[in-house]
Image (tube, helix red, strand yellow):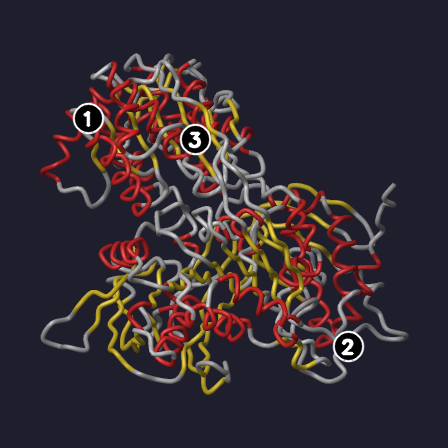
């Protein structure tokens, strides 16, 4: 059955069509071409023609001319629109004309770097020119690094390596920095939050070193989906950037469907499990051999879907090896093999986390299924765009969960289609981030007392560092004098650079490394007695050596998986702003503590709880920002007595659930960027208090925006709860309610309505 026939069956079968909350058919878009620019090197034109490229898409031609005129640019066009040529053409053209010229390519992941290097080297091979392109990352052998520093025309790396291995050792990269003409920043939208704030400072340091060596490179940025591309690129680069956002690339017809699983318990508002709905939909596509990618919102979801889809492949008589998973934690060789299998067509379906959301070439896929709203409009378009990379028909399905934001999206499709993608927020002048990079900058080159760096003067920070014996001032410049190498102590991603290695001991004679997990995620995934799933294979965690960062596992075949519960606490450090009201609110700096407490054993396919166990691991903490709301005692007083603690706790749980799930729609952020804590008697306020905090250490301003968007959030939460059809509360409004007679839904509404909201004109 073809994809068209399958779509017709889905939309006409009453049982299946009843689940379709929204259906849109996007017509094909023809290509808009321009001739090769007359100034483009003719050898390069010939090489392009040998690849079957007779003309450029209009945005590729526009990008080339803008770069040739000396401007920084950012190109924002859909997936599979040929953005790679927007930077490869000016770079190769410049090197062909000026053999000493150099370019630096920055990609957020190693996988994307490897993919783009293959593309560039293929074009260079057709040129038959001596243009040396090298990848410089943590896997580069020491023996090759000297040759790369001396002879690399194009150095491909990532921001982390630029930060720790290139900028601090700039004297070894003399030829690169003296002749650097272009800096490429791909997947611009990835550089947001704390990571983007750090990278903004890395770019400041890069440009500072370039000025020292007499160069002033142009920046070429690319992205597929972002709401504020020019503003974001301007801030990241530190100079005005020209925006190119009108694509000339063609696209085929695309069907987008929002699927809402049916309600199976109307009283509690519980819907059929999303993964089972995704399994059935993926099964139709696998049965008909339609190349498919399925996105899960977590590593566990991706592995469960891999298991389910392999079972379906067996049931339909297909080779289960044609179904694979993909996520962080797989070995690089495993990921490359899966990517190659998708390109070559030997893999028919893949279940992935957002690790395949980026522009890695994975061939021509016919359908994309999203197991739950990814958390942002940008990510949703990115994931949907992984199918339909030709002019053929493609389909994308968003299968909603019971989460309030998912339900909001499927009930208000106009929000998704009419809103621009989320704005990327960064704050390079965040005090903690800025201070970290000023230490690195002073280590690289002495910092002038009046030297501009960032939006504000930095002498106060430098004086504080001098008191700590980290720098020394001579009246004209600040010199780094500490013994420690500063860049090694600064993680761009605001998380430990360490990983926990997972070692398979099934064969005692030959223990084997099967994967790794980052340190922050390890407590939830590889605690003792966890079931760790890798490429669909289950492993039982026998022992977690926290000090040595190693988890020892053995292969098992069980009918359950494990899920950890994390206890979170919060402590206010500083209150930056407040507003008195019947529902008082404030925002400021906080310390969040987290510790895994227990794990549940959940049966495969049914998610039935079949057991539990304790987790014994140390507590972790980090600094961030939060907004909080204080419940007035008068609001929670009954006819004669205040609400008892269990009722108050239920009300706070319900209200915090609604707020943290509706806020991303107004903050234009990812749901996973926010966390919640509620306390019957907060140590900071001495009253019942709800905290919504930024998950990213340091924060990027979301908490302050929540504080200022108070009226909009309150109205949206009231509408969400009032319009939900459940009786007492459900996962689609205030969270799952199991007790008969629970008043959490009504109580949350009572608290919300107590807030004095300004009238919207």
* Circle 1 SS class: loop
Above or below, 329 against 54 in this view is below
Q: Which residue is mark 2?
A: 727
- Between marks 2 and 1, how big is the CA–CA gap? 68 Å
Residue 590: numbered disc: none
Q: Position of residue 732 (x, y in %)?
A: 67, 68
* Residue 467 seen in the figure: no
The numbered mark, 3 or 1, whose residue comes first in the sequence reads: 1
* Residue 584 seen in the figure: yes
The image quadrant of residue 114 is top left
- Between marks 3 and 2, how big is the CA–CA gap? 50 Å
How packed is label 1: few (under 14 Cα within 10 Å), some, or many (20 or more)? some
The numbered mark, 3 or 2, whose residue comes first in the sequence reads: 3
Q: Which residue is mark 3?
A: 221
The numbered mark, 2 or 1, whose residue comes first in the sequence reads: 1
587 relative position to 190: left or right: right
Above or below, 344 against 109 in this view is below
Q: Residue at x 46, y 22 (%)?
A: 459
């Amino acid at each position: 059955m073809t994809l068209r026939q399958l779509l017709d069956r889905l939309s006409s079968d009453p049982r299946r069509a009843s689940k379709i909350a929204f259906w849109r058919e996007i017509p094909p878009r023809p290509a808009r071409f321009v001739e090769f620019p007359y100034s483009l090197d003719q050898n390069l034109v010939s090489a392009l023609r040998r690849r079957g490229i007779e003309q450029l898409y209009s945005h590729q031609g526009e990008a080339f001319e803008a770069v040739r005129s000396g401007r920084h640019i950012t190109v924002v066009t859909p997936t599979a629109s040929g953005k790679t040529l927007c930077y490869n053409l000016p770079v190769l053209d410049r090197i062909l004309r000026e053999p000493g010229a150099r370019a630096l390519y920055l990609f957020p992941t190693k996988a994307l770097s490897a993919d783009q290097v293959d593309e560039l080297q293929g074009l260079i091979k057709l040129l038959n020119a001596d243009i040396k392109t090298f990848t410089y990352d943590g896997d580069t052998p020491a023996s090759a690094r000297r040759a790369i520093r001396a002879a690399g025309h194009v150095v491909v790396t990532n921001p982390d390596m630029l930060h720790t291995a290139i900028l601090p050792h700039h004297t070894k990269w003399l030829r690169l920095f003296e002749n650097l003409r272009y800096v490429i920043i791909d997947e611009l939208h990835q550089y947001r939050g704390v990571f983007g704030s750090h990278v903004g400072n890395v770019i400041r340091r890069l440009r500072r070193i370039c000025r020292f060596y007499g160069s002033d490179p142009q920046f070429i940025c690319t992205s597929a989906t972002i709401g504020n591309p020019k503003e974001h690129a301007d801030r990241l680069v530190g100079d005005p950037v020209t925006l190119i956002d009108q694509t000339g690339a063609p696209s085929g017809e695309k069907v987008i469907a929002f699927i809402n699983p049916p309600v199976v318990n109307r009283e509690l508002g519980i819907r059929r499990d999303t993964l089972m709905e995704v399994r059935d939909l993926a099964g139709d596509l696998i049965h008909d051999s339609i190349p498919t990618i399925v996105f899960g919102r977590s590593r566990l979801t991706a592995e469960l879907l891999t298991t389910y889809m392999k079972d379906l492949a067996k049931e339909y008589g297909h080779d289960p090896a044609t179904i694979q998973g993909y996520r962080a934690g797989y070995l690089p060789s495993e990921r490359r093999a899966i990517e190659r299998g998708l390109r070559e067509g030997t893999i028919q379906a893949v279940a992935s986390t957002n690790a395949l959301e980026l522009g890695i070439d994975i061939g021509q896929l016919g359908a994309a299924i999203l197991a739950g709203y990814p958390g942002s409009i940008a990510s949703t378009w990115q994931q949907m765009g992984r199918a339909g990379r030709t002019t053929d028909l493609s389909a994308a399905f968003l299968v909603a969960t019971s989460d309030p934001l998912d339900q909001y999206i499927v009930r208000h499709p106009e929000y998704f289609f009419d809103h621009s993608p989320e704005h990327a927020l960064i704050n390079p002048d965040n005090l903690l981030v800025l201070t970290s990079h000023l230490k690195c900058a002073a280590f690289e080159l002495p910092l002038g007392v009046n030297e501009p760096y960032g939006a504000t003067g930095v002498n106060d920070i430098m004086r504080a560092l001098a008191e700590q014996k980290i720098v020394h001032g001579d009246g004209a410049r600040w010199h780094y004098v500490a013994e420690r190498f500063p860049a090694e102590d600064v993680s761009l991603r605001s998380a430990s650079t360490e990983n926990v290695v997972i070692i398979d001991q099934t064969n005692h004679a030959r223990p084997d490394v099967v994967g790794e997990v980052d340190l922050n995620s390890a407590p939830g995934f590889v605690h003792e007695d966890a079931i760790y799933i890798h490429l669909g294979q289950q492993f039982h965690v026998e022992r977690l050596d926290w000090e040595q960062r190693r988890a020892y596992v053995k292969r098992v075949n069980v009918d359950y998986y494990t899920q950890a519960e994390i206890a979170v606490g919060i402590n206010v450090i500083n209150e930056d702003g407040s507003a008195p009201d019947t529902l008082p609110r404030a925002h400021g700096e906080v310390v969040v503590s987290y510790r895994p407490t227990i794990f549940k054993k959940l049966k495969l396919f049914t998610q039935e709880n079949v057991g539990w166990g304790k987790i014994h691991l140390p507590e972790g903490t980090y600094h961030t920002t939060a907004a909080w709301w204080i419940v007035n005692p008068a609001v929670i007083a009954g006819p004669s007595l205040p609400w008892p603690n269990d009722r108050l706790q239920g009300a706070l749980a319900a209200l915090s659930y609604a707020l943290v799930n509706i806020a991303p729609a107004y903050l234009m952020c990812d749901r996973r960027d926010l966390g919640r804590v509620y306390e019957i008697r907060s140590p900071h306020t001495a009253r019942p208090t709800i905290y919504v905090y930024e998950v990213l250490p340091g924060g990027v301003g979301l908490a302050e925006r929540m504080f200022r968007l108070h009226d909009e959030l309150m109205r949206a939460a009231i509408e969400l709860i009032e319009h939900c059809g459940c009786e007492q509360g459900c996962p689609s409004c205030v969270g799952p309610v199991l007790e008969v007679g629970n008043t959490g839904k009504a109580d949350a509404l009572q608290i919300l309505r107590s807030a004095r909201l300004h009238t919207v004109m």
